[in-house]
Image: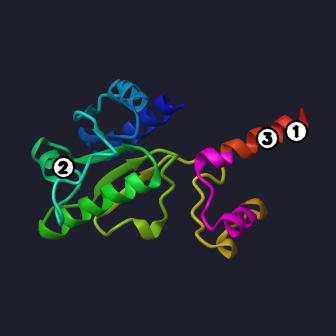
Amino acid sequence: RVERELAMLADALLRHEVKTAAFVVDAAEDEAAGRSAEATGLVLLPPTRCDVPLAAAGKPRFPVDAWLSSGAQGWLISGPAQCARDVLQDVRRLLDTRRMPGDRPIAVTLEAGLTPSDIPRGIELLSASAGIVPILADKPEDAHEEDVRTFIDRFGVRPSYWTALGRDAGMLAGAA
């Protein structure tokens, strides 16, 4: 699944004229899955893990400046929403201090599920989605599906991709 998502997102980055992308991953499996993205012709910089520690207070956690110096024209993120938000925050900080032509594409996997309010100006989000996933509602009244409204009301957060997948598996198991 991740291999196909990354290959599809890499292809989308290429269509947006990105030839080189920074690669942010959550797990070692994502690093291996990145080979499928490179098979599309996209050049990925060496992967950076989502859990990269903060080097110094007030500084970006992710090496955005180094990525740009290495030729990154976009980003490919295979990790949870918080990881994608942290990368976006660091990218936004850098874009606020530099004049750069055009939008910078950031591609995220299903797991991220970012809302439009998460996307800063100057960033173009390319996202994998399937059915109602990613769920963009933050409040129960914003959800279109009753199951999603109930989940957000009960737990106070929107369901992740994995939660939605588990729910679907449970429904299929119940029907079987």
* Residue at x-position 49% and y-position 33%: 2
Foreground residue, 137 or 50? 50
Task: Look at the image and tell me whether residue 130 can be seen.
Answer: no
Segment colored magenta: 148-164
Asked which secondary structure carries label 3, the reply is: helix
**On the image, numbered disc 2 is attached to which residue?**
63
Q: Main secondary structure of the magenta part?
A: helix
The N terminus, quarter of image: top right
Q: Which mark is residue 174?
A: 1
Q: Tell me if residue 162 comes above or below residue 6 in the rendering.
A: below
**On the image, numbered disc 3 is attached to which residue?**
170
Within-10-Å neighbours for mark 2: few <14, some 14–19, many 20+: some
Q: Mark 3 or mark 2: which comes first in sequence?
A: 2
Q: Residue furthest bottom?
A: 141
Q: Tell me if residue 38 comes above or below residue 10 in the rendering.
A: above
Disc 2 marks a residue whose amino acid type is Pro
CA gap, disc 1 to disc 2?
47 Å
Disc 3 marks a residue whose amino acid type is Gly
* Residue at x-position 40% and y-position 35%: 27
Asked which secondary structure carries label 2, the reply is: loop
Disc 1 marks a residue whose amino acid type is Gly
**Quadrant of residue 149 in the image?**
bottom right
Asked which secondary structure carries label 1, the reply is: helix
